[in-house]
Amino acid sequence: MNNSNYFSRWVFGFIILLLLWLAFTFPFSLPELYTGIVVAAFTALLTAKYFDEFGISSFAPGKILGLLIYIPIILWEIIKANIEVAIIVLSPSLPIEPAIVTAKTKLKSNIGKMFLANSITLTPGTLTVDIIKDTYFIHCIKIAKTDEKYATDSIIGKFEKHLRRFVK
Amino acid sequence: MFIIGVILITIGVTFSTLGALGLVRMPDLYNRLQTSTKATTLGAFSTIIGVGFLNPAWLIKTIVIATFILLTAPISSHNLARASHKWGIPLSDKTSVDKYDSKSGKKE
Amino acid sequence: MTILIWIWSIILSISIILVLYRCIKGPSLPDRVIALDMFTTITTGLLVLIAHFLNNYVLLDVSLVYALLAFISVIAIARYLESAKRGD
């Protein structure tokens, strides 16, 4: 996983932290900008050794484009799944068949697994309970079959092909 | 802009209430986590973005707050689910299968 | 406009009452923590609505810090539950 040198990680952390600072202090003045540059540079220096999966290469146009395409997809999935759950909550008989199932992922990097786990958790009806190596333990509110292949196809499949554009 | 804001806030308030209803109605802890926290996340997200549309000078700040909620909500609910499983909260009677053994998961 | 904000706030308050019902009744400790987590999320939305109602930009910063502290406290409680012995 150690695929970027210290300087490249530092530049990555600096840019991300500076953008965050600018967003937090939105109608910013010039002194605030100077303070932000100093604080971001110092914090990036302290934390660079922990973020070893990032670097300048993370800003490649293809990856940023993949992320930008992914955001509307995940928002649409969230809205669709929320409506399904709303129907379940409003129906008087509570038609639920909960189960904890396993599913396998092909993603290799930790950051990719993190994206996938958060996507699964954000769409209601599925909730990641734990990850051990490449196995996801997912609590489903309503699932037709509980075998691993079906769960992998129906829960992970729809996110994984989009995620593979920008994470390993 | 005004119409979009009103629609977004109405959607958000509706989903927040549905999430709260789910929290009261669901039989066990995991189903409560499912329906409640995430419906509420969409609710708060939509409400906050809607306020940004009503008041365009605030749009960037509201997007920052909404994105923050969207990023942190799954992490906290994931943590709570795993902690409850290790704590020993039973699943509801309707549960068909539980493939997760938290004791063996702890060793690795 | 004012009447709309009143209606939204009243509906959100009703959902907060539902959440507090679960927080008081909740059979186990994690149930109460979930109710609290949800309570803070709804309150963040309500704070932003109030910021618009009062036209006060500072309340946006307040809601951001509120969401941040709520997230950290829920993570801390979850970590504590994972390591604690069950005593109810």
Image (cartoon, coloured by chain):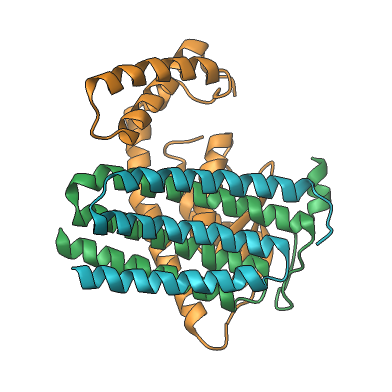
Residue at x-position 79% and y-position 61%: B88
Residue A70 appears in the picture as rendered: no
Could you say where residue A12 lies in the image, as x and y percent from the top left? Answer: 42, 21
Residue at x-position 52% and y-position 61%: C38
Could you say where residue C68 lies in the image, as x and y percent from the top left? Answer: 48, 43
Apparent colour of chain B = green
User: In the image, A88: left or right of B79?
Assistant: left
Apparent colour of chain A = orange
Residue at x-position 74% and y-position 58%: B85
Residue C52 appears in the picture as rendered: yes
Residue at x-position 53% and y-position 17%: A46
Could you say where residue B19 lies in the image, as x and y percent from the top left? Answer: 49, 70
Position of B84 relative to A10 (above/below): below
Front one among A114 and C62: C62
Apparent colour of chain C = cyan
Number of dots carrying numbers: 0
Could you say where residue B101 lies in the image, as x and y percent from the top left? Answer: 79, 56
Q: Which residue is at the far bottom?
A: A92
Q: Where the N terminus of chain A falls, by quadrant?
A: top right
Position of C25 relative to C44 (above/below): below
